[in-house]
Image (spheres, helix red, strand yellow):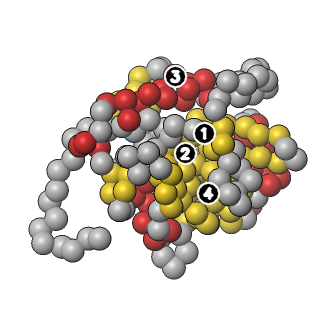
Amino acid sequence: MAIKPVEISKFYRLVNHGPTAMISAKHNRIENVMSASWVCALDFAPQAKMMIVVDKAAYTRTLIEQSGYFAVQVPTVAQAELVLDMGESRKENPHKLDNVPLFYLENVDIPLVEGCAAWIICRVIDEPHNQQVHDLFIGEVISAWADDQMFDNGRWKFDELPDDLKTLHYVAGGQFYQIGKGFNLSRGSNVE
């Protein structure tokens, strides 16, 4: 396993299948991680962008607003319990990060959760109306990374992976689904 960069023009492939995500941010040495289901690729050219929805009550939102940056992580089935834990309020659970394995990539001052399948680093594109009225943040993707055991050469390897390394999808009330089996209907198109 190695964490490898993903071409910015292909970052969308990390989230296009709709996985539950974890969002992290940091400001003034204060870190936080939260779970989020409303995460979506928005564009890949000429400027790669994605969007996240973060409620005003979320502590991570304050860190995003203050720092102007956030990271989106794509967790695996093995991390389902962690995803639920990160959905808890930091205000009500100030020590929620105490046992969370975090790491930093070179030149990236945002905490990242170890063991995820992918990480996307974003700089906030300030859109005050969207942020205040809809809780929607748009980020310019400045780098993307993936565990090459799970995603390599611009492709997920779900059909080869054990279940615990597949991405997960949260519905509600503790109910998750894991990504299923892939199939291809390319009809001769040449998608890289």
Question: What amino acid is labelled 4 in the image?
Answer: Ile
Q: Are marks 1 and 2 in contact (CB under 8 Å)?
A: yes
Residue depicted at 54% across the width and 29% down the height: 83
User: Residue 147: percent from the left, percent from the top?
Assistant: 45, 48
Vertical comparison of 140 with 151: above or below: below
Residue tagged 4: 121
Q: Report the Cα–Cα distance between label 3 and label 4.
A: 23 Å
Q: Which residue is mark 2?
A: 73
Please tell me which of labels 2 and 4 falls first in the chain.
Answer: 2
The answer to whether residue 37 of the structure is visible from this angle is no
10 Å neighbourhood of mark 1: few (<14), some, or many (≥20)? many
Q: How many marks?
A: 4
Which residue, given by chain and number where applicable, does mark 1 sit on? 113
Q: Position of residue 124 (x, y in %)?
A: 69, 61
Q: Using the numbered discs, state the Cα–Cα distance from disc 4 to disc 1 in whole angstroms.
A: 12 Å
Which residue reaches farthest left?
Answer: 187
Look at the picture and state if 176 lies above or below 137. Answer: above
Q: CA gap, disc 1 to disc 3?
A: 13 Å
Tell me if residue 99 comes above or below residue 103 in the rendering: above
Crowdedness near tag 3: few (<14), some (14–19) or many (≥20) residues, C-alpha within 10 Å: few
Quarter holding the C terminus is: bottom left
Disc 1, SS? strand
Q: Which residue is mark 3?
A: 81
Looking at the image, the residue that sits furthest to the bottom is: 46
Viewer-nearest of discs 1 and 3? 1
Task: Left or right? Give the position of 70 relative to 143.
Answer: right
Q: Amino acid at mark 2?
A: Gln
